[in-house]
């Protein structure tokens, strides 16, 4: 067998592309966009008082609400379907009903206690959607049922 040798020398008149400055500029742009961008908060912080424990802020008995999430991701509030589109993470009908109930309860001097009953095979994202709706309505007295 005959070995093939390749002449790896570069002649002086060959064009050369120096990309070291291009790499520096790329990293500078990356750092610039990372520093100047803002991240969108998708999840809402929710300070939950677990198991329906009340802090004693009101003397009136609390208004009880029941939210159910079935395996298909359908959300119902007190037996009425308020969210059947699983792709709609905002669940506007639930948010509206929660805000209305909160306002009515506070006018009467009471808190709202929410019982969440999620099916064992319900989508976790749907539970997060419901928790975000509760946070947007500023409701924190929540308990979970089976």
Image: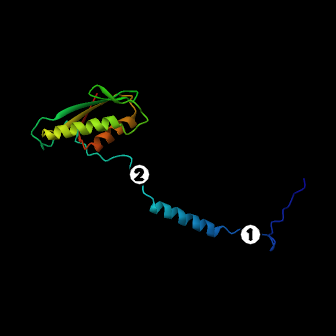
Q: Secondary structure at mark 1?
A: loop
Say which of marks 2 and 1 sits in front.
Answer: 2
Q: Residue at x 81, y 72 (%)?
A: 11
Counting residues from the N terminus, which is met first, the one under dot 2 or under dot 1? 1
Where 71 falls versus 33 (above or below)? above
Q: How is the image coloured?
A: rainbow
Mark number displayed over residue 131: none
- x then y, percent, for residue 128: 36, 39
> Residue 62's quadrant in the figure?
top left
- x then y, percent, for residue 146: 28, 27
Q: Residue at x 90, y 55 (%)?
A: 2
Seen from this angle, which residue lies furthest left?
Answer: 59
In the rendered structure, the answer to whether residue 40 lies left or right of residue 13 reads left
Residue that carries the numbered disc 1 in the rendered image? 16
Q: Residue at x 41, y 32 (%)?
A: 85
- x then y, percent, for residue 120: 36, 28
Residue that carries the numbered disc 2 in the rendered image? 40
In the rendered structure, the answer to whether residue 36 lies left or right of residue 17 reads left
Any part of residue 53 in sight: no
Where 65 falls versus 19 (above or below)? above
User: In 3D space, how far apart are the residues under numbered discs 2 and 1 (Cα atoms)?
Assistant: 44 Å
Seen from this angle, which residue lies furthest bottom?
Answer: 12
* Mark 2 touches mark 1? (CB < 8 Å): no
Where 136 falls versus 17 (above or below)? above
Any part of residue 88 in sight: yes
């Amino acid at each position: 067998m005959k070995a093939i040798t390749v002449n790896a020398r570069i002649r002086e008149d060959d064009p050369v592309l120096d990309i070291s400055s291009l790499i520096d500029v790329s990293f500078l742009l990356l750092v610039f966009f990372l520093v100047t961008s803002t991240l969108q908060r998708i999840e809402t912080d929710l300070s939950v008082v677990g198991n329906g424990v009340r802090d004693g802020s009101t003397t009136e008995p609390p208004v009880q609400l029941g939210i159910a999430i079935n395996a298909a991701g359908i959300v119902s509030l007190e037996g009425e379907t308020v969210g059947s589109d699983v792709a709609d993470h905002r669940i506007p009908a639930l948010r509206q009903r929660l805000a209305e109930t909160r306002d009515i309860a506070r006018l009467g001097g009471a808190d709202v206690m929410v019982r969440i009953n999620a099916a064992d095979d319900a989508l976790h994202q749907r539970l997060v959607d419901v928790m975000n709706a509760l946070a947007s309505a500023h409701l924190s007295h929540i308990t979970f049922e089976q």
